[in-house]
Image: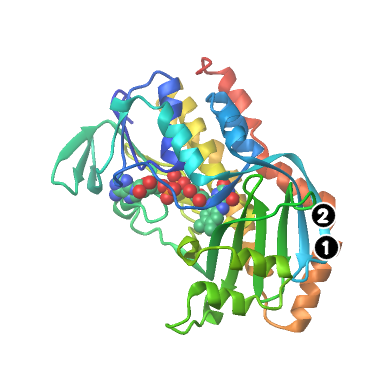
Amino acid sequence: MKTTDKITIIGGGIGGLTMALTLQRNNQKFKLFEKSEEFKEVGAGIGIASNALKIFDKLNVGKKLREEGHLLKKTILATEKLKPLKTVPFPEEVYCIHRASIIDTLSNELDKDSYELNKEVESVENKENIKIKFKDNTFSEFDTLIAADGINSTIRKTVFPEIEIRPANQVIWRGITKFDINDDLKHTYYELFEGGLRFLFLPLNETEMFWLAVQKKKNFSKNSTTSIKNYLLDTYRDFHPIVLDLLNGTAESNILQNELADIEPNYKDWFKNNVVFIGDSIHATTPNLGQGACQAIEDAYTLGLCLKNNESNTFSEYQNIRSKKVKYIVKQSWKIGKMSLIKNGLQKMLLHLLIRYFPKRQYQRRFNKVIDIKYLNELENTTVNIV
Ligand SMILES: Cc1cc2nc3c(=O)[nH]c(=O)nc-3n(C[C@H](O)[C@H](O)[C@H](O)COP(=O)(O)OP(=O)(O)OC[C@H]3O[C@@H](n4cnc5c(N)ncnc54)[C@H](O)[C@@H]3O)c2cc1C
């Protein structure tokens, strides 16, 4: 690996912007390129757990993001009629935050000359130096490229063309709506399991709810004249009235539809020559543990510390520190996603029994494993304080 004098970050999502802020706090020069005309995110909330919040604290943006977000204290896993199957208090902080607030907070901290918008990478040559060709027919050269260009990463397709996206065959809809949030709902993340359908909702702030609805792709059959909103109202008609109120209150134009996918973690490397990957570009995960962005944030901060140490094995050190935990999360999340949408009545009964009798301490043990960032202590002790 060459020296890290000239670093570029490709992609200005949550991962790329956290990477940029880490390098800036670390007094390391870099240039970030983002293909969109502005830093932006979809109109949805996101769960940010204490692992990411602690890193945001280290980067001096944690306080602001907590102010922008909404504290959650527990998950209630329940039937479609809102009958609780299990209540699990969060052992540490979890906030629901609007995605745009995270993007704005991070990007507002950056020096204006450290990034360029409207610059889409078309291809890269990953040799002694990195040569980047942009869609606007301009070129740049760097010593190190940090790819943060998301699940459909152009850089990954060039560097690791063998790595494939794995479709989960599930469709997810998301929306935000004004809602009368009573005390029971105020700090609670509800997850409703019907068998073939899931519905999740959580407060985004004092007056708005963020919801997510999930269904197997093969069961999604919408007549072209039916709106998504009417399709969802019909599909979820047997759910608790709160669900129908949430759907009814959401404007059709504010409903997002995506297909879930991840990258199965059976590939070997997170880097090649002078290109290194962070976040969804290398380890996209399904959202069942609410950890995709949190892991991108952990990647960015860890890689920042490794780059600061500037050892000859920077990238392998970064990968060694991060990959075991990430693989665990991607695999667990995939399993949860498969188990939570099942076919028939018997399986539904078994699912409800499993949720009810799966020991609470097991949920908390998994949660504790996911939010554990103690590995950073050792790394920080060998690195000068960066903020
Ligand atoms: C339904 C759903 C719910 C989720 N819920 C949670 C949650 O609760 N908690 C959580 O932690 N995570 C959650 N996630 C995961 C989280 O959204 C992602 O893991 C996270 O956004 C990944 O960030 P990233 O920066 O790696 O990639 P992205 O956010 O995809 O950012 C990539 C950036 O690169 C830019 N780009 C792409 N190609 C190029 C190019 N060629 N040149 C220049 N720029 C380029 C894009 O415009 C974009 O800005 C969820 C995901 C989904 C789908």
Residue 226: give x, y in percent of width and height: 48, 81
Name which residue lies at 56% across and 29% down.
Answer: 64
Look at the picture and state if 32 lies above or below 311: below
Residue at label 1? 84
In this figure, which colouring scheme has been used for the structure? Answer: rainbow
- Relative horizontal placement of residue 340, taking residue 110 as reference (left or right): right
Residue type, mark 1 in image: Pro
- Give 374 or 74, whichever is nearer the viewer: 74
Check contact, mark 2 vs mark 1: CB within 8 A.
yes
- Relative horizontal placement of residue 139, taking residue 340 as reference (left or right): left
- Relative horizontal placement of residue 140, taking residue 266 as reference (left or right): left
Residue 224: give x, y in percent of width and height: 42, 82
Look at the picture and state if 313 lies above or below 285: above
Residue 75: give x, y in percent of width and height: 75, 53
Asked where in the image residue 118 lies, by quadrant, the reply is top left
Name which residue lies at 62% across and 57% down.
Answer: 288
- As helix, strand or loop, the secondary structure at mark 1 comes to strand
- Relative horizontal placement of residue 198, taking residue 12 as reference (left or right): right
Mark identifier at residue 170: none
- Please identify the residue farthest to the top as the structure is shown: 384
